[in-house]
């Protein structure tokens, strides 16, 4: 009751038109999708003549680092998505071993725009055509000196992506894939470009989800990464996740993530937890 009353100021005709979980959850970069991979779906529950939006907070804990992310996104007319997010990459005790100081934290701000081009992942059940969207994310890192010291070419960069998502309602199955053109090191947390490569290159993001109920989806994601820095190899990312929507205003996502090697420290596997509130 309290959750519903909190959104009474939003006109009934302008929100809540989409099915539960069909806006996705919030990625670590703030866009609508899974935890690691962007989807073509537009965030929030506003339908084609409505508005939806959310705020999120995400925490990732692996043996040698912590990643914190929070932000907000709005979906306009189930066509355009605008998002902002801030990431904090806390090196903890590892910072001392890397020579940058214990607890040293990289901060990155991300501004994103996504536009749906064709298709509808939910309503186009009589065709194989997926929902297709294109997007841009501009990222700004606050540690330019250290980025350059480890071989990065810039502390700002822009990613471009095209995503396709299909929901098979009869099979309770969601499949999504995206190609991202990027030169971001660890999504930009270690800057952009490097001594190995400075060009934008295509990388893949994929998600699959199975709806156990209208409130609960489980699945897995895979995200390839560029390998630009000579001092440390960069591995692809994988997760196994479960997302539960209490209602259209509150959801929680938990995952086991494998982030591989980060800044010479191997086997970065651990917990991903994200809360999202919206309409």
Image (spheres, rainbow, N blue to C red):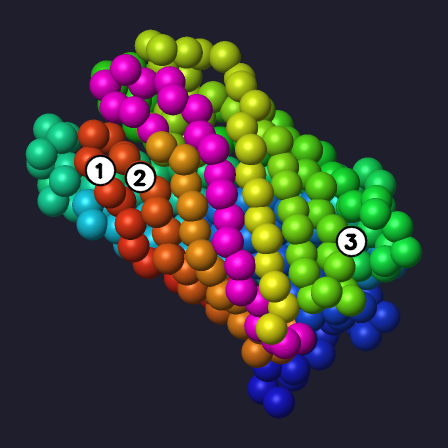
Q: Report if the CB atoms under discs 2 and 1 are less than 8 Å apart.
A: yes
Q: Quadrant of residue 278?
A: bottom right
* Residue receiving disc 1: 266
Q: Write down the residue under mark 3.
A: 121
Q: Residue furthest right?
A: 126
- Residue at 9 percent across and 36 percent down: it is 96
Q: Measured from the top left, where is residue 43 in percent x and y?
A: 67, 55
Marks 2 and 1, how far apart at CA: 6 Å
**In the image, is residue 71 above or below residue 163?**
below
Residue 136 rendering spot, x and y as whole percentages: 63, 32
The segment highlighted magenta reads: 213-234
Residue 156: in sight, yes or no? no
Would you say 197 lies left or right of 179 here? left
- Counting residues from the start of the chain, the first of labels 3 and 1 encountered is 3
The residue nearer to you, when weighing 231 against 237, is 237
Q: Is residue 200 left or right of residue 75?
A: left
Quickly name the residue at label 2.
260
Q: Residue at x 82, y 38 (%)?
A: 117
Q: Is residue 120 left or right of residue 91?
A: right
- Dots 3 and 1: beta carbons under 8 Å? no
Q: Is residue 162 above or below residue 84?
A: above
Cα separation between marks 3 and 2: 32 Å
Identify the residue at image location x=61%, y=31%: 179
Q: Position of residue 144 (x, y in %)?
A: 32, 22
């Amino acid at each position: 009751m309290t959750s519903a009353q909190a959104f009474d100021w939003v006109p009934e005709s302008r929100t809540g038109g989409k099915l539960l979980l069909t806006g996705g959850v919030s990625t670590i970069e703030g866009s609508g999708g899974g935890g690691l991979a962007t989807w073509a779906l537009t965030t929030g529950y506003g339908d084609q003549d409505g508005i939806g939006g959310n705020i999120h907070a995400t925490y990732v804990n692996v043996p040698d680092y912590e990643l914190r992310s929070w932000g907000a996104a709005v979906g306009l007319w189930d066509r355009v998505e605008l998002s902002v997010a801030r990431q904090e990459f806390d090196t903890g005790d590892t910072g001392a071993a890397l020579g940058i100081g214990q607890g040293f934290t990289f901060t990155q701000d991300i501004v994103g725009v996504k536009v749906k081009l064709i298709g509808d992942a939910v309503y186009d059940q009589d065709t194989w055509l997926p929902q297709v969207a294109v997007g841009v994310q501009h990222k700004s890192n606050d540690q330019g000196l250290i980025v350059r010291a480890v071989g990065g070419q810039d502390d700002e960069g822009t990613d471009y992506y095209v995503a396709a998502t299909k929901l098979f309602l009869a099979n309770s199955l969601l499949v999504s894939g995206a190609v991202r053109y990027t030169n971001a090191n660890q999504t930009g947390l270690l800057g952009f470009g490097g001594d190995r490569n400075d060009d934008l290159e295509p990388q893949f993001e994929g998600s699959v989800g199975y709806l156990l109920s209208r409130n609960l989806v489980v699945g897995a994601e895979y995200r390839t990464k560029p390998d630009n820095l000579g001092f440390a190899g960069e591995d692809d990312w994988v997760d196994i996740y479960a997302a539960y929507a209490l209602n259209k205003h509150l959801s929680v996502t938990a995952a086991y993530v494998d982030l591989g090697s980060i800044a010479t420290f191997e086997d970065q596997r651990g917990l991903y937890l994200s809360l999202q509130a919206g309409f």
